Amino acid sequence: MALVGAVTGVIALLEPQVPVVPLLVLYLLAVLPVAIAWGAGPAILTSLVSIVTFEVLFLAPVGSLGVAAREQAGALGAFLLTTVLVTALAVRLRRAAVESARLTDEQSALRRVATLVAQAVPRSTIFEAVTREVGILSGADLARMERYDADGTVTGVATWSRVPEQLSMGTRLNLDGIGVAREVRRRGGPVRLDGFADAIGEIAAESRALGIRSSVGCPITVAGGVWGVIAASTRSGEPFAANAESQIANFTGLVATAVENAEARAQLHHLAEEQSALRRVATLVAHGATPGLVLAAVAEELSQLTDADITGIFRFESDGSATLMGVHGVNEDEMRVGHRRVLDAPSAIASVQATGESVRYDVDDSTLQQLPELLRRWGIRSAVASPIIVEARSWGGISVASRRGPFAPDTEQRLAEFTDIAATAIANAEAHTKLTQSRARVVTTADETRRRIERDLHDGAQQRLVSLALKLRLALETLPTDIPPESRTALSEVADELVEVQDELREISLGIHPSILSEGGLGPALRTLARRSAVPIEMRLETISRYPPPVEVAAYYIVSEALTNVTKHAQAKYAEVAVEERDDTLRLSVRDDGIGGAEQHRWSGLVGLRDRVEALGGSIDVLSPSGQGTVIRASLPVAPAVGEPSSASA
């Protein structure tokens, strides 16, 4: 009416100067805005009001059959037809503008979400953005994105609301009764529901509590399967637009891409972590770490990779029991490394012991009471175990357990990769142990043989030589005086040679095994070596303890070989020998000021010394830079020493 009044005022101003009939067209200025703003109906009404107003105010009465009447009727008809055409064009323009605005908004929303996907932001951020855009574009009051779970439930992962109330998020809802999530999963396509008045189920009850009158949803398809659903809901009686499903469907593709990208990134990240963990454990194995250290590392790495609450590594014994070799996630009071017991059934690790095959146990409320008491107390909900095969025999097994729910489907594969490394570590350790034991047996046997030969020489040949020399001296004293001098001289020379042979035999026996080492210990034996050395020796003995014979023998021969090298090759003027006990280890050091440059591979005595030392679990190192002398350091683990250590020097 305002527009018609304004145009009428303009016509009234122009009427004195312009013929009035053509001015009728000015009323289009009132009809056109109404058509654009409110559509065809109000526009036609506005045109009729314009015609009546124009006819009453500006057209003079004329006869029904006169020329003027026909002209006026033609003008009014033409105006009405023009109005209808302009209105139709305006309405179409209005619809195009609305659709263009809608498409612009939709494309802007899609672009915003696509940008987030391209930026590789966290999935939760993308889920929230998609849910918000879907709710706004569809004119909904509430919206929620939901993920289908393996146990037949659905969990909200993102929500949006135009009203104070919110749909639940993070809570698992059963798919019973009527609901968008249930229908989308059943049909595999878009779903529209109007009303939840008589529906049953958790989702329907939630919808009634929030006053939801209508809902529409579309599936999110990832890797060919329905991953989840996006649902929009309204509390008004006006239904969603006919294209609401297509609007939502445009976003589900982006969500699927985001999920696939995130899962791919997560998989790559997990693969990198797994490879790093395998590399760390493999490094321990390559460096010859003890099985206990390797298995402890395996237990810790597996707990982190599989998100396990408890990890245990067991060695199966011949009597049917099992020994815990590594554990992570429990107190030592509950499970102690080295503890041996019979495994309780039913359990994953007991099944591995019985069958030798990998196994998975997923526990629900109905089967929880069937578990052993310890597993019930821990609240175990899932367990996976795999055997450890060493040299074609079942050595033991690895088990991971979770209190929160089932493990990922690829947990068995990850477990198998670590069991291979654990098996390699165990096989290497067993081979190293057997080699060490073999070395130790060889060294012990050689030492026993040396001691027996030295004892036999001392108690047998040496004693006989001493006895023969005494008898010969006695015989010389009792010979008649008329014996020719040359005969007496010859017999005297024989007696002297017997003494020399006795001394040589004593030296030989000392080289085989020094009796003073067995009788007096390491300190006196090393002092004897120092006194016999042609090079001045400073000796610092910071212990007077006795050690196991293999340790004392090894220490003696290290010092003996080093001093021999000092005398023969080093051209040294001075040498220093230091012996101390620290941290249950006997530490030896032999240092000289010679020419250095000792080549270990040409020093034949060092090979035997290294074998002897390593057989005892020790180590020996030689540092001999040219022109800077030679340093030999050795460490020998010792059992609790006999006697108390003290400080002394010689």
Image: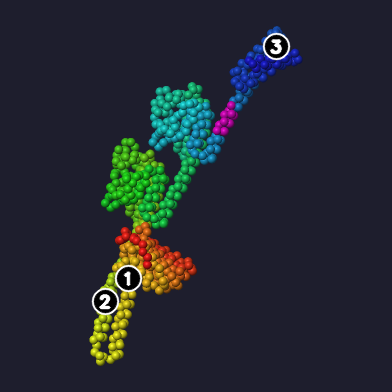
Q: Earlier in the sequence, mark 2 or mark 3?
A: 3
Q: Is residue 343 left or right of residue 37?
A: left
Residue 106: say if magenta: yes
- Local packing at callout 2 (Cα closer than 10 Å; few below 14, some 14-19, many 20+) is some
x and y, in percent, of residue 425 in the image: 38, 54
Q: Which residues are magenta?
A: 98-109
x and y, in percent, of residue 640 in the image: 31, 59
Quadrant where the N terminus is found in the figure: top right
Whether tag 1 and tag 2 are in contact, CB under 8 A, the answer is no
Alpha carbons under labels 1 and 2: distance apart? 17 Å
| The label number, if any, that marks residue 463 in the structure image | 2
Instruction: Locate residue 612: give its quadrant.
Output: bottom left
Residue where numbered disc 1 is placed: 514
Assign a secondary structure to mark 1: loop
Let me know if residue 529 appears in the view: yes
Assign a secondary structure to mark 3: helix
* Amino acid residing under circle 3: Phe
Residue where numbered disc 3 is placed: 58
Assign a secondary structure to mark 2: helix
Residue at figure coordinates x 33%, y 75% from the top left: 507
- Local packing at callout 1 (Cα closer than 10 Å; few below 14, some 14-19, many 20+) is many
| The label number, if any, that marks residue 529 in the structure image | none
Alpha carbons under labels 2 and 3: distance apart? 162 Å
Residue at figure coordinates x 68%, y 14% from the top left: 8
x and y, in percent, of residue 133 in the image: 52, 31
* Amino acid residing under circle 1: Pro
* Amino acid residing under circle 2: Gln
Q: Is residue 191 left or right of residue 443?
A: right
Residue at figure coordinates x 54%, y 40% from the top left: 118
